[in-house]
Amino acid sequence: MSEKKSSAKSSAHEVRVRRIYNDAQKSDGTRILVDRVWPRGVSKDKAQLDEWVKDVAPSTELRKWYSHDPEKFDEFARRFREELQSDDAAQALDELRELAQKGTLTLLTASKRDDISQATVLAEILNDGKQSNAEKSSTKQSASKSNSKSSSKDSK
């Protein structure tokens, strides 16, 4: 009976986003790098990856255009979702879906702000359109920072 309960739990998946520069946690589950370029200063041993899925990363052109500008994130996410419909990207995304069905999946990125990275867009897709709690708090923090910046500009 307890085996059925534990297998039922494993069918519910959680997809997380973390920076590859942070130490690996036991709770990470399967660790997948979703950047097209290998992160600077990270050895393959330190990364503790299960896999590197380059095909699910944004194109070089999109990545360079975006340049992690928070004001471009919504448009980046829209364009990135379009790119994910190409054959190679769609196949890689299906691979991530399969991994997520098996248990916790942590998508790793070298982005300074993981809350506005391709990993966040992927996690939202894999979580059936729902943001994880960590993503929600990061989004709220970045929204409050941008609101306070615009408020201070308005008061000048």
Image: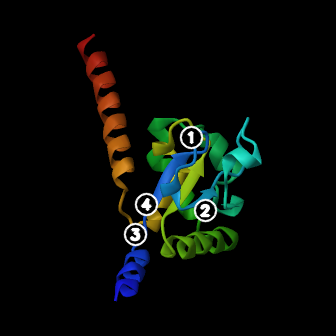
Residue visible at 48% across and 65% down in the picture: 104
Dot 1, crowdedness within 10 Å: few (<14), some or many (≥20)? Answer: few
Spatial CA distance of label 3 from label 4 is 6 Å
Q: Is 26 in front, or is 92?
A: 26
- Give SS at disc 4: helix
Q: Which mark is residue 54?
A: none
Position of residue 37 measured from the top left corner of the image (x, y, whole percent): 73, 47
Pointer 3 with pointer 2, Cβ within 8 A: no
The mark nearer the N terminus, 2 or 4, is: 2
- Residue 23 placement, left or right of 12: right
Label 1 or label 2, whichever lies nearer to me, is 1
Q: Is 5 in front, or is 124?
A: 5
Residue under pointer 2: 83
The mark nearer the N terminus, 1 or 2, is: 1
Q: Does 3 sit above or below residue 73?
A: below
Pointer 1 with pointer 3, Cβ within 8 A: no
- Give SS at disc 1: loop
Position of residue 17 measured from the top left corner of the image (x, y, whole percent): 49, 52
Spatial CA distance of label 1 from label 3 is 26 Å
Q: Amino acid at mark 2?
A: Glu
Is any part of residue 121 visible from this angle?
Answer: no
Q: Amino acid at mark 3?
A: Asp
Q: Amino acid at mark 4?
A: Glu
Q: Which mark is residue 128?
A: 3
Is any part of residue 129 visible from this angle?
Answer: yes
Residue under pointer 1: 22
Pick the quarter of the image with the C terminus. top left
- Give SS at disc 3: loop
